[in-house]
Image: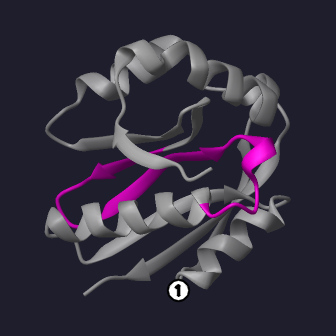
Amino acid sequence: MTAGLRPMAEADIPALLDIERDLFGAEAWSSVLFRSELAEIETRGYVVAADPAGIVGYAGLCAYPDDAWVQTLAVRRDRWGAGVGRMLVEWMLAEASRRGRRRVGLEVRADNRRAQDLYRRFGFEPIATRRGYYQPSNVDAVIMQREIG
C-alpha cells in the first residue's frame, strides 16, 4: 500500500501521539508541542504520510533565516523499510529549497543508526555532537547537515 503526503492538521494529533509514544517513549512530543508547531505557519512546514489505513509517518521542518532544520521525522514501525522515510526526507529537502534555504540540519539520536543511515543516503554528514541532548534518557544527539542547491 503506497502512502501519500498531505499537510498535517490538528485533527491528526491523536494518531501522531500514538506513533510518538511507541517510538520515543518518555521523550515523545506532547499534543501541546504539536499544536504550538502547527501554529507557526510562517516558519514551519509539517506533513503526514497517510494511506487508507491511516497515518504511517510525519515530518516537520523549520525555516530559519539562513537555513532549515528538521523538527521531527517518524515512521510507524510496521512501515519501516517501505519508503515512507525516504518520501518524508525528499519532501523536507524540497520544502527547504522552495523556501530558499541552502542548508538543512538536524539532530538524531546517537543510538539511532537506522535514521542516521537514511539521512546519509541523502547526503547528510555528521558535523557535531550534543552531549546528553535527549532527556530523560541522556542520549547524545548527532548533528547532521547537508547543502542543497
Can see residue 71? yes
Give the side of residue 16 with respect to residue 38, left or right.
Answer: right
Q: Residue at x 25, y 22 (%)?
A: 39
User: Residue 11, how many percent across, how many down?
Assistant: 41, 13
Which one is nearer the viewer's eye here, 46 or 128? 46
Residue 81 location (% of width, % of height): 75, 63
- Please rate how many residues cluster around mark 1, counting C-alpha atoms within 10 Å: few if below 14, some from 14 to 19, many from 20: some
Q: Is residue 24 above or below residue 95?
A: above
**Is residue 127 something one can see in this rendering?**
no
Q: Indicate whether residue 63 is drawn in magenta.
A: yes
Q: Would you say 95 lies left or right of 114 here? A: left
Residue 47 in which image quadrant: top left
Query: Is residue 49 placed above or below 90 in the rendered structure?
Result: above
Q: Which residues are magenta?
A: 59-83
Q: Residue at x 69, y 60 (%)?
A: 82
The secondary structure type at the circle numbered 1 is loop
In this view of the protein, which residue sits in the foreground, 98 or 2?
2
Q: Position of residue 96 (x, y in %)?
A: 27, 64
Q: Nearer the viewer, residue 77 or 105?
A: 77
Q: Which residue is mark 1?
A: 123
For the C terminus, which image quadrant? bottom left
Residue type, numbered disc 1: Gly
Which residue lies at the image location 21% right of the left edge and 66% below the top edge? 66
Q: Is residue 101 magenta?
A: no
